[in-house]
Structure formats: structure tokens, C-alpha cells
Image (cartoon, grey):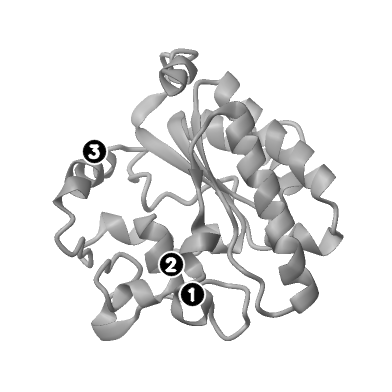
Amino acid sequence: AGLRAIAARSSTKRDDVFSKLGDSNTVNTSYLACFAGAQVDLAGRASLEPALAHFKAGRVDTTSPFERVSLSATVGWSAGSSLAGNPSPLQQELDAAQPRFATVMFGTNDVGAMDPFTFGRNLFTIVDTLTAQGVVPLVSSIPPRDDNATADAWVARYNLVARGVAQARRVPFVDLHRELLTTPTHGLGPDGVHLNVFLSGGAGGCMLTSAGLGFGHNVRNLA
């Protein structure tokens, strides 16, 4: 009921369109974009097929939301980057795409500041901006930071902030961090920061088989 109330704030948003908000792990073409192509294996999860068909039919200009390049997802971004400027990249994306939903994952680049209070304020602003305009946010925790023990120690605090924001605003929370903890190398590439992806036989992040789910982007795409 709460999510329907958010959606009711705008009659112009497209119910078959979502936007992707985040940093390098979100702008990476292994995140969701492959669902627009042929290299998709749901591994028997028939319950996901209607959602896949629904969003594949959505269009922003000539592009489906899966493959669309977001105006509010950029390498190296923190949560505050999405809010900088007038209009902000966040607002530019909402104006251009008119999405009903948005995936939100920031924090990997924020942890270096060791300031979860500023991160929380920025994340609240992002979520409140979305909900005020009839967009339902799906807030995600961030992956481990296996490149740096100090940074990784802060990841837990930032993920608690993200969970708290989602709970306070009563919107969905995807605990990607929890899912990655049982994935080989935490689903991270050699740098210990960026998600890796299943690349056997030309396949990619939308192979949701047991082999595919040994990799970070595949785990995130399923989640």
C-alpha cells in the first residue's frame, strides 16, 4: 500500500521503465543490460519471466530500461555526485526517462570519507526526491571492499545507513552485501572493488545458472 501511494504521486511515470542510479558497479554494462539481449538464462525461474517481458517492452526513446545508459550513474561517483548541480544528474535522469522505479546503490566511493552522516543525508535526499515524484526506489547495500581492510570495516556502517534509510521511508532494500559474502572472492574482480562477471562462451551477467552465480554481477542481477 505504501509503494502504491508513492506511485500515485505521478500519473506520468512509465510503469515499464526503471532508472539505474549509482557508481561504476552500476554503469557497468554487465549490470542488467544483458537482459535486453539473447544471452539470458533464468535457470528455470519461470516466475521472473513476466517481469523480464514487462521491462523489455519499456522504452526511453528507442532503448529499453535494461540497456539504457543512465544520466545518474558514473564511474567514481559518491551519493552526493548524483545531487550536484541544478538540475542535478538525478533530476536530469528522472526528467528524461520518466521511470516508475529506480535502483539505487551508492557507498563504495563514499566509504573513504568515513562520514556515514553525510552519506545518510545524501541518500535520504535521493530517496525523498524519487518518492516525491512518484518513483519507487530499490535501495541496495554495497559489496565488500576487499582492496582495503579499513575501507571494508566502514562498509558495514554504510550498509546499516542504507538499510536505515530504506526502513525509514518504507521502500525495498536489497541486501547485495549479504548475498556476495557466500560468493567466491565475494563476487569481486582482482582489484577487490568492482564486481566480476561470468564470461564463459560469450555469456555474461544474465546467466543465472549455478555457474553464473559464482560471479558478482550475476548475483546482483538476480537479486
Q: Secondary structure at mark 2?
A: helix
Which residue position holds label 2?
217
Query: Is the residue 10 above or below the residue 154 in the image?
Result: above
Mark positioned earlier in the residue sequence (1 or 2): 1
Mark positioned earlier in the residue sequence (3 or 2): 3
Query: Is the residue 149 above or below the residue 33 in the image?
Result: below
Which residue position holds label 3?
54
Which residue position holds label 1?
187
Q: Callout 1 environment at 10 Å: few (<14), some (14 to 19), or many (20+)?
A: many
Query: Could you tell me the amino acid type at mark 3?
Result: His
Whole-angstrom CA distance, mark 1 to mark 3, is: 28 Å
Q: Quadrant of the C terminus?
A: bottom left
Tell me if 49 is positioned left or right of 36 in this view: left
Q: Quadrant of residue 56?
A: top left
Tell me if 14 is positioned left or right of 157 in this view: left
Mark positioned earlier in the residue sequence (1 or 3): 3
Q: Secondary structure at mark 3?
A: helix
Query: Could you tell me the amino acid type at mark 2?
Result: His
Tell me if 61 is positioned left or right of 172 in this view: left
